[in-house]
Image: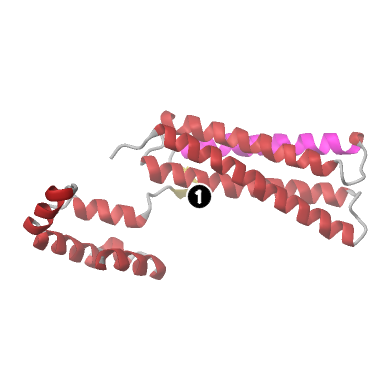
Amino acid sequence: MPYDPAYLGSSLNDRAYDAASAGDTALNAIMRQNNAVGRLASGATLHMFGEAMRKTFTEEFDKAALFAFNLTGENGPDVVKPLDYFAGRVVDLLMDKLVLCGRRTGLDEATVAPEFNKIRVSMNEMRARRIRDFAHGMMGNERMKRDPVVSIVNTQSNSPGAVQQVGVGEFSQSAIIQHHQQLVAAIDRALASPEFRQLEQTQKEGFRDIAEV
């Protein structure tokens, strides 16, 4: 079934605010930690701020990119564009949180502003690099792959003789009755497939639960 572009956009928007919340939590933790040892108004705080923002951006972008790829099954312009917009929103939202925290450190604006600008520039450089990697099917040093359970289901459901479609109401009942043995065989093939054997144990258990149902 084709994905809904509106759903992709709204989900990425939600994830941008989740990223901002994660960044806020990290910044406040740094402020509490440095305040406790009497170094809140210091260059060490700004350095830790930068590390936290870059880490948050990386983690949140990678999760969103994997979500977008698993949802759409592609990495073309129609997916790159909303993902890039998401990345820009994350940078802006994290910087908003950073500015608010910066005012509470006790450091003067002349000291804080240049360092915050460096943080923004570095996150935008990360944004450009990760978007370029995504467009070429890469995440870090690994080629992106769709969710393994999704891959197994697609492989087995497209196998000869497998049940291709299940409807609702009377149709679904007749389809299940008519193709019961084919459905059981497709599930058995999935559990015996090389793709299944390559899954982690927790993924295997989850897939077995689905198969039993």
Residue 21 appears in the figure:
yes
Residue 161 appears in the figure:
no
Which residue is tagged 1? Answer: 141
State left or right for residue 46 relative to residue 67.
right
Q: Nearer the viewer, residue 85 or 47?
A: 85
Per the picture, the main secondary structure of the magenta-coloured stretch is helix
Crowd band around label 1 with a 10 angstrom C-alpha radius: few (<14), some (14–19), many (20+) = few
Q: Which residues are magenta?
A: 111-134
Q: Position of residue 7 (x, y in %)?
A: 43, 37
Q: Residue at x 19, y 48 (%)?
A: 168
User: Is residue 59 in the magenta section?
Assistant: no
In the depicted structure, whether residue 210 falls above or below residue 93? below
Q: Position of residue 109 (x, y in %)?
A: 90, 35
Corner quadrant of residue 148? bottom left
User: Is residue 127 in the magenta section?
Assistant: yes
In the depicted structure, whether residue 105 falls above or below residue 34? above
Q: Position of residue 125 (x, y in %)?
A: 64, 35
State left or right for residue 196 relative to residue 30.
left
In the depicted structure, whether residue 210 falls above or below residue 89? below
